[in-house]
Image: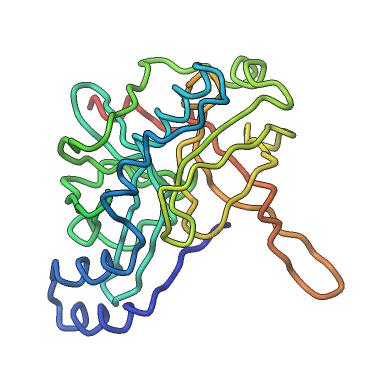
Amino acid sequence: MLRFLKSKVTLMLSIFFGLGLVSLSAFSSLKSAQLNSRTEIHSRQNITKSYSELRRRTIYKSRNSAVNVMSISPDGGLASSSGTYIRYNQKYYIMTVSHGIQGPCDLIRIVVGENMYECLELSMNDRKEDYALIEVGRIPELAPVRMPHSLPKGSEWRHSLSIHTDIVYTGYPNSIGPLTIDGKIVGYGENDLLFLHSFAWPGSSGSGVFSEDGKLIGYVMAVNLGFTEYGIGILEDIVIIAPAYKIDWEQLKQ
């Protein structure tokens, strides 16, 4: 599975949290290490005009809902993953992967450019299906993806996604981003997992994956591993996607 970048600031953060202190300055130092700027925020809308209007709208949707999720464990371990800003039942959430959540809600920050947003509640953290939903307030720089109240499941979901369907996702591999990456569906796995011919790297996990017509079909969960005579190698061009319908959205209504 994709694991997360542990940056050089981990040691410094360990000092803060080793004393039991939750300090925003730790997150500020982490933010300064990223390549985010006002120019990059504007670049979310800087999409090539060579694509069709439909594809441009999908890319725009992907880029304008992508966030960087930073999570710190109580012992000072740092995780960086990606997520998607979602509106559901009049509330706002970040959809991401469970393996990127290292600590409780008060040790999670959502990074968008030069701004950080707090976790209001860790609404769901499903280790088995590897997803998490983080409730947040409104993020004015972004446009939330509206989740439908019903999603196709099982064979209906698979039949809606043919081999070589084009996809796009935006994430923060290696804590750099937002980076928008495209690819194609090349196969199906157990439990309705999808295999993409695309690219991912540590930090990409949690990125929302969109079909070319703008539907949120799932999230980046892992990259494939290959075994050679030299040992295990990461096949970063074979990306594993978990379907969005695996998330128990109904639980949010309870």
> Is the C terminus in the top left, top right, bottom left or bottom right quadrant?
top left
> Is the N terminus in the top left, top right, bottom left or bottom right quadrant?
bottom right
- The answer to whether residue 130 is above or below residue 58 is below
Residue nearer the viewer, 180 or 106: 180
Residue nearer the viewer, 168 or 130: 168
Q: Is residue 117 left or right of residue 67?
A: left
Residue found at the far right of this picture:
229
- The answer to whether residue 15 is above or below residue 156 is below
Q: How far from the left and from the top, in percent, is residue 90?
A: 18, 22
Q: Is residue 100 left or right of residue 213?
A: left
Q: Is residue 29 left or right of residue 224?
A: left
**Figure coloring:** rainbow
Q: How far from the left and from the top, in percent, is residue 96?
A: 39, 45
Q: Residue at x 35, y 57 (%)?
A: 101
Residue nearer the viewer, 151 or 57: 57
Q: How far from the left and from the top, in percent, is residue 113?
A: 27, 51
- The answer to whether residue 52 is above or below residue 244 is above
Q: Residue at x 12, y 75 (%)?
A: 21
Q: Residue at x 62, y 49 (%)?
A: 199
Q: Residue at x 47, y 62 (%)?
A: 174
Q: How far from the left and from the top, in percent, is residue 192?
A: 63, 31
Q: What is the number of callouts on the image? A: 0
